[in-house]
Amino acid sequence: MNTPALGRGVVMASVGLLMAFLAIWQWVPAMLNVPSFILPPPTKVWSETVRMLGTEKLLLHTGITTLEVVVGFVLGSLLGLVVGCILGVSPKTELVLSPYILALQIAPKVAFAPLFVMWLGYTVYPKILVAILIVFFPVMVNMLTAIRTVDPDLVNLARSFSASRWQIFRMVEYPMSMAPLFSGLRIAATLAVIGVVVGEMVGGNKGLGYLLVFGEGQGNTAMVFVTIIMLTLIGIAAYWLVVWAERRVLHYLPRAQHTMV
């Protein structure tokens, strides 16, 4: 099979589907006499995008939201990675901490946003904290599950060579858990955007979440659509950065394991 030709075909199909969607969005609401303040056509959304770019507000708020997403994702992922590793290698610790972690996950994250705002004010920190809470759990669960499902024969083989507990973790459990870990990171990358936006909508004067509330208050539907599109682009970019990192790490791991052996 010609892979490059297949790739071009997929790209053309995706572009064609997008063009068809935009055409339907542009013409069908007009044919049904749907007011533009309810469902603005793509041309009006584009005009609003150009206007917002001209005032530099869109870039400013997008940059702030992007920064909060990156920081929240990185810190939440690191926290989930560390806690997942600890619980994975220590079943007793999991028994002690799991009720509290589960309670934290069950509690609605939106409910924490006003509390963080009251504690930390209208700064970036409440938004980052909400993102950390949302990102933490999927990364932690995937890491914990990955370590617990490592092939026991590999662990026994390492023990037969008198490997210490740390060596077993570093050379067997951690490398074998990379694929499930990145599955959790893919989910976390999109959830980080949700966490930040929730924080900005509840108590923010900057960021795309603030623009959503501002556009809704002004009755500017086109601005709301522009903001949603920008948030979607941030989520897509975060997701594909994780995919790129996953390919690099998983491509390197076999060679690293061979070198250790």
Image (cartoon, rainbow, N blue to C red):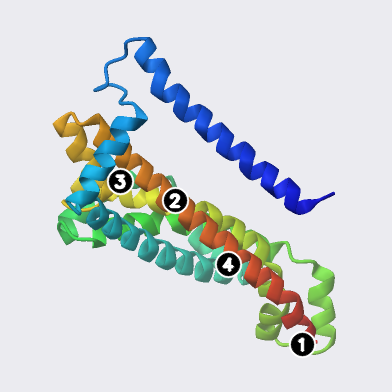
Q: Crowdedness of circle 4 by 10 Å Cα count: few (<14), some, many (20+)?
A: few
Q: Is residue 232 left or right of residue 110?
A: right
Residue at 24% across, 54% down: 61
Marks 3 and 2, the one that precedes in the sequence: 3
Gap between marks 4 and 1, in whole Å? 21 Å
The reply to whether the C-beta atoms of the residues labelled 3 and 1 are less than 8 Å apart is no
* Residue located beneath label 3 in the image: 198
On screen, residue 84 above or below 131:
below
Q: Is residue 79 left or right of residue 49?
A: right
Marks 4 and 3, the one that precedes in the sequence: 3
Gap between marks 1 and 2, in whole Å? 36 Å
Secondary structure under badge 2?
helix
Task: Tell me, for residue 235, which label it has, or none.
Answer: 2
The reply to whether the C-beta atoms of the residues labelled 4 and 1 are less than 8 Å apart is no
Task: Tell me, for residue 164, which label it has, or none.
Answer: none
Secondary structure under badge 4?
helix
On screen, residue 52 above or below 179:
above
- Where is residue 215? Give x, y as percent: 20, 36
Gap between marks 4 and 3, in whole Å? 27 Å
Task: Tell me, for residue 259, which label it has, or none.
Answer: 1
Q: Disc 4 residue type?
A: Ala
Residue at 36% across, 66% down: 71
Q: Disc 3 residue type?
A: Val
- Where is residue 53? Give x, y as percent: 24, 50
Marks 3 and 1, the one that precedes in the sequence: 3
Q: Crowdedness of circle 3 by 10 Å Cα count: few (<14), some, many (20+)?
A: many
